[in-house]
């Protein structure tokens, strides 16, 4: 077992390969990050500039407190998103999970498989006990995908996001290591 996220693995599934993200992935990721609907679904108010993204993704390999992997569609070899384990709390063996995929690959099972691969790695290789996330009320597709991958709802953060003048609730979800092999469909 590893003691942190210094090791950046390549994880292979039937539909996707997860590999360390680099600044060379920015041209593939930029359209996704600038997509207005993806911004809404992820609650991102940020305006992403290519130079800032190159610096950000170029520094991910040196981070021992987080794991950022590119999602590569196996059928095409195309980078279609990213998965991240971050906000690592070593003392409590827990961290946060997030995923972002290009709009044209949603609904094809890539996100579910990518989620299972990285969360499984967190439990099995890093020794995490709990992996959590938040999903906004206007993103039921993501919530279903998280449930399918083994996450369970734990509670609601009322009005957690202010989006275009409206407050949106976020559901806190988590997967626990002891349940990992038994809750996935």
Image (tube, rainbow, N blue to C red):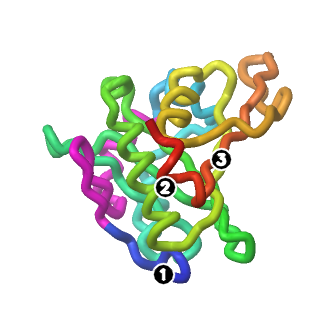
x, y percentage for residue 44?
62, 36
Quadrant holding the C terminus: top left
49 left or right, relative to 138: left
Label 2 sits on a secondary structure element that is helix
* Mark 2 surroundings within 10 Å by alpha-carbon count, few (fewer than 14), some (14 through 19), many (20 or more): many
Distance (Cα) linking label 1 and label 3: 22 Å
Compared with 55, 90 (above or below) is below
Q: Which mark is residue 120?
A: none
Seen from the viewer's position, the closer of residues 89 and 1 is 1
Location of residue 123 in the rendering, given as x and y in whole percent from the top left corner: 52, 64
Mark 1 burial class by Cα count in 10 Å: few <14, some 14-19, many 20+: few
Q: Would you name the residue on which mark 3 appears?
A: 174
Residue appearing at x 53%, y 26% in the figure: 144
Element on which disc 1 rests: loop
Q: Is residue 44 magenta?
A: no
Q: Which residues are magenta?
A: 10-33
Q: Residue at x 32, y 24 (%)?
A: 104
Q: What is the spatial separation of the Cα atoms under label 2 and label 3, in whole angstroms? A: 11 Å
Q: Is residue 52 visible?
A: no
The image shows residue 113, relative to residue 170, as above or below, that is: below
Residue 119: assigned label: 2
Residue highlighted by disc 1: 2
- Dot placed on the residue nearer the N-terminal end, 1 or 3: 1
């Amino acid at each position: 077992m590893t003691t942190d996220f210094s090791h950046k693995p390549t994880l292979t599934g039937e539909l996707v390969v997860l590999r360390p993200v680099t600044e060379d992935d920015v041209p593939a990721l930029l359209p996704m990050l600038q997509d207005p609907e993806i911004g809404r679904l992820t609650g991102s108010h940020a305006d992403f500039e290519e130079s800032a993204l190159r610096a950000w993704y170029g520094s991910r390999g040196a981070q021992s407190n987080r794991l950022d992997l590119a999602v590569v569609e196996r059928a095409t070899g195309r980078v279609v998103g990213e998965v991240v384990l971050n906000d690592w709390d070593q003392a409590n063996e827990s961290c946060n999970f997030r995923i972002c995929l290009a709009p044209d690959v949603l609904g094809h099972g890539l996100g579910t498989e990518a989620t299972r691969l990285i969360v499984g790695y967190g439990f099995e290789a890093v020794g995490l006990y709990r992996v959590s996330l938040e999903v906004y009320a206007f993103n039921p597709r993501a919530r279903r995908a998280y449930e399918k991958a083994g996450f369970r709802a734990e509670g609601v953060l009322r009005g957690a996001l202010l989006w275009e003048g409206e407050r949106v609730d976020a559901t806190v979800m988590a997967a626990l290591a002891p349940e990992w092999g038994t809750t996935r469909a």
